[in-house]
Image (spheres, helix red, strand yellow):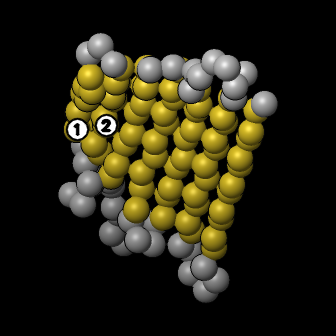
Amino acid sequence: MMIVLLAVLAVAVSGDHHHAFSSQHVHKHDGHHEVTHPKYHFEYKIEDHHTKDHHSQHEERDGDVVKGYYELKQPDGSIRHVHYHADKHSGFHADVKFSTHHEHHHHH
């Protein structure tokens, strides 16, 4: 049995040019009831220029192994990138990096 959930939300505020976008995808795979082997994949992304909320995540699981990635725009404009991995042998590990995103503003 495979269950697929897809939800997409897009909002445009009339009267100004602020747009918000959010989407998510979830795939769940179920095998036989005698064998338990969890397996899934999901991802989502949010970009809201009005609230300055920008983040996304991608994660997948196959049995006891979970791998994922997310990024988040910090209040100072830098981007936090996190890659993570977890399994029953080594536990949870995350690699966190920051990058700066330079925005160019033109004044007239």
Real-space Cα separation, disc 1 to disc 2, in angstroms: 6 Å
Residue 31 visible from this viewpoint: no
Compared with 28, 75 (above or below) is below
Residue 81: which disc?
2
Say which quarter of the image contains residue 41.
top right
Compared with 13, 7 (above or below) is above
* Total numbered badges shown on the rendered structure: 2
Residue 28 visible from this viewpoint: yes
Query: Residue 49, how many percent across, how many down?
Result: 46, 66
Identify which amino acid the numbered label 2 is placed on: His
Nearest to N terminus: mark 1 or mark 2:
2
Residue at the image point whose x is 53% and y is 73% from the top: 18
Nearer to us in this view, 108 or 44? 44
Residue at the outermost top position: 89
Left-right relation of 67 to 82? right
Compared with 101, 50 (above or below) is below
Residue at the image point whose x is 42% and y is 51% from the top: 55
Nearer to us in this view, 29 or 80? 29
Left-right relation of 15 to 88? right
Residue 98: which disc?
1
Residue at the image point whose x is 33% and y is 61% from the top: 105
